[in-house]
Image (spheres, rainbow, N blue to C red):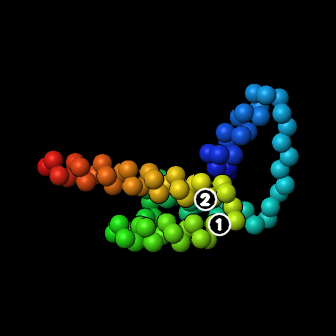
């Protein structure tokens, strides 16, 4: 699995004829990426906005050494905020 950032780099390299080298890492597995994927899908976030923000900060700290993971966490958080805003506006219209 790759992040959206890494995917974009791979696609760009394929069009320009570039070559990238990847080093296999035994520390990267589905155990790392599945929770990030679930957050992106809107799963696993707490119900309270306060706890959502705390979880976001926790995830940033936990993955601070990996830019692709940080980008994924930020994407999921922004998606969560936007979906919460949309839900709130629908509820207020009812």
What secondary structure is found at the residue carrying circle 2? Answer: helix
Left or right of 77, for residue 60: right
Q: Residue at x 63, y 66 (%)?
A: 63
Nearer to me, 90 or 33: 90
The image shows residue 71 at horizontal and vertical percentages of 59, 54
Left or right of 6, for residue 50: left
Left or right of 5, for residue 13: right
What secondary structure is found at the residue carrying circle 1? Answer: loop
| Farthest residue, direction left | 94
The image shows residue 45 at horizontal and vertical percentages of 43, 64
The image shows residue 73 at horizontal and vertical percentages of 55, 58
Mark 1 or mark 2: which comes first in sequence? 1
Cα–Cα gap, marks 1 and 2: 7 Å
How many C-alpha atoms fall within 10 Å of the one at disc 2: few (<14), some, or many (≥20)? many
How many C-alpha atoms fall within 10 Å of the one at disc 1: few (<14), some, or many (≥20)? few
Left or right of 85, for residue 59: right
Q: Residue at x 67, y 51 (%)?
A: 1
* Mark 2 lies on residue: 70
Q: Is 11 drawn above or below residue 56 in the view shown? A: above
Is disc 1 in contact with disc 2, using a CB cutoff of under 8 Å?
Answer: yes
Q: Is residue 31 visible?
A: no
Which numbered marker is on residue 41? none
* Mark 1 lies on residue: 64
Q: Is residue 36 visible?
A: yes
The image shows residue 11 at horizontal and vertical percentages of 71, 34
């Amino acid at each position: 699995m790759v992040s959206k950032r890494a995917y974009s780099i791979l696609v760009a390299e394929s069009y320009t004829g570039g070559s990238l080298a990847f080093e296999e890492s035994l520390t990267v597995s589905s155990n790392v990426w599945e929770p990030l994927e679930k957050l992106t899908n809107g799963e696993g976030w707490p119900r309270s906005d306060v706890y959502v923000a705390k979880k976001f900060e926790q995830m940033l700290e936990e993955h601070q050494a990996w830019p692709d993971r940080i980008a994924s966490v930020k994407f999921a958080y922004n998606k969560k905020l936007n979906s919460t805003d949309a839900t709130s506006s629908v509820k207020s219209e009812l």
